[in-house]
Amino acid sequence: MEVTANMVKELREVSGAGMMDCKKALSETNGNMDEAINYLREKGIAKSVKKESRIAAEGLANIYVDGNKAVILEVNSETDFVSKNEEFRGMIDTIGNTILKSDAKTLDAANALACEDGTIKDLIINKVAKIGEKLSFRRFEVVEKSDDEHFGAYIHLGGKIAVLTVVKGASEDVAKDVAMQAAAMKPLYVFPSDVPGDVLDNEKAVLKEQAMNEGKPADIAEKMVEGRIKKFYKEICLAEQAFIKDSDLSVSQYVSNNHGEIKSMIRYEVGEGMEKRNDNFAEEVMSQVKGE
C-alpha cells in the first residue's frame, strides 16, 4: 500500500513521533494506522503522546547574538537533569540560531521555521521521543539595536536566568553590568514610567493605609506615601535600583557616568509563573520502570 503524506501527518499527530519514523512505521505495517502506532510504541518512539499532560517547568534560557540582532528564549523540560543533556542543549542552539536568521516574531512562526529536522516543531517532537520527557518551547523575543547601542547578555546559573539589555552609548561591559544587576535583583520594570497605573494606584493605596494604621492623619499619610513610593521604585525598577557594584550609585547613574543610557531589559527566569513538579526522584524512577 502506498504511504501518503496525509497518512504520515495523521500518524505524527497521534503518536508525536518524527516524520521519518512515522513513514517507516507505515511502510512496515502496510499503511495500517493501528499497527503503525503499535510499531512505534514497541520501538519506544511514541512516548511523547503520554507526556503532553506532564509538567515541564525546568529547562534553560539562552541568548543568541549576531551583529545588531539578538534572540532571548526559554525552552522547558520536565526535569533539571534533562536540561544538562547535550541533546537538549543542542536543540536549543538550533532553535535560537534558526530564529536569529529569520523574521519570526511569534511562537507559531518560529515553530514553522525550517531546520535540519524539518521544522522547529518537528525538531522538538523528535527530541521528545529521543529524550523521553515533555519538552516545550515556551517563549522568545527578538531585539534589535542601532550601531551606537550595545547588547548586554548575561546567563546566570548555567541558563536558569537569562538577561538581555540594550544600552545606548557607554560600552558592552557597561551593558553587561546592567544585565548582571537585573539577574541578581530581579527588577520588574526598567523605569518608573513603565509601572502600570493600576499597579501604582494599588501600591499607593496600601502604603496610605499602612501610614494611617500607624496613627498618621490623612494629609501626613499622603506625604509619607510620596516618600515610600520612591523606595518602591528602587525595589522594582532597574534604573532606580542601587548598583550592586557601588551602592552609592543608582544603576541609571552608573550608566550615565559612563556616557550611556539604558534603553531596554528583558529578563527570563526558567519556569517563572509555572506550576512546578512535586514528585520525587524515586517516583520518577518508578514511573519510568512502569513505562508511564
Image: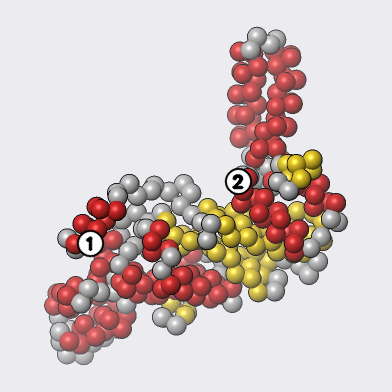
**Which residue is identified by label 1?**
288
Q: In the image, residue 88 lies at what x, y percent? A: 42, 69
Q: In the image, residue 207 lies at what x, y percent? A: 64, 23
Task: Report the quarter where the C terminus lies.
Answer: bottom left
Residue occupying image coordinates x 46% and y 52%? 271
Question: On the image, numbered disc 2 is attached to which residue?
Answer: 186
Q: Is residue 154 above or below residue 219?
A: below
How many numbered marks does the figure carry? 2
Q: Position of residue 98 (x, y in %)?
A: 53, 76
Give above or below for 250 relative to 284.
above
Q: Quadrant of residue 142?
A: bottom right
Horizontal side of 234 relative to 121 (left or right) equals right
Quarter that holds the N terminus? bottom left
Going from N to C along the chain, the mark reached first, 1 or 2, is: 2
Q: Element under label 1? A: helix
What's the residue type where badge 1 is placed?
Gln
Identify the disc placed on residue 8. none
Residue 6 visible in rendering? no
Q: Could you tell me if residue 174 is visible in this image?
A: yes
**Viewer-closest of 114 and 234:** 234
- Tell me the residue at 17%/87% (across/down): 28
- The local crowd at label 2, few if under 14, some if 14 to 19, many if 20 or more residues have their Cα within 10 Å, is some
Q: Residues within 10 Å of mark 1 (few under 14, many from 20)?
A: few
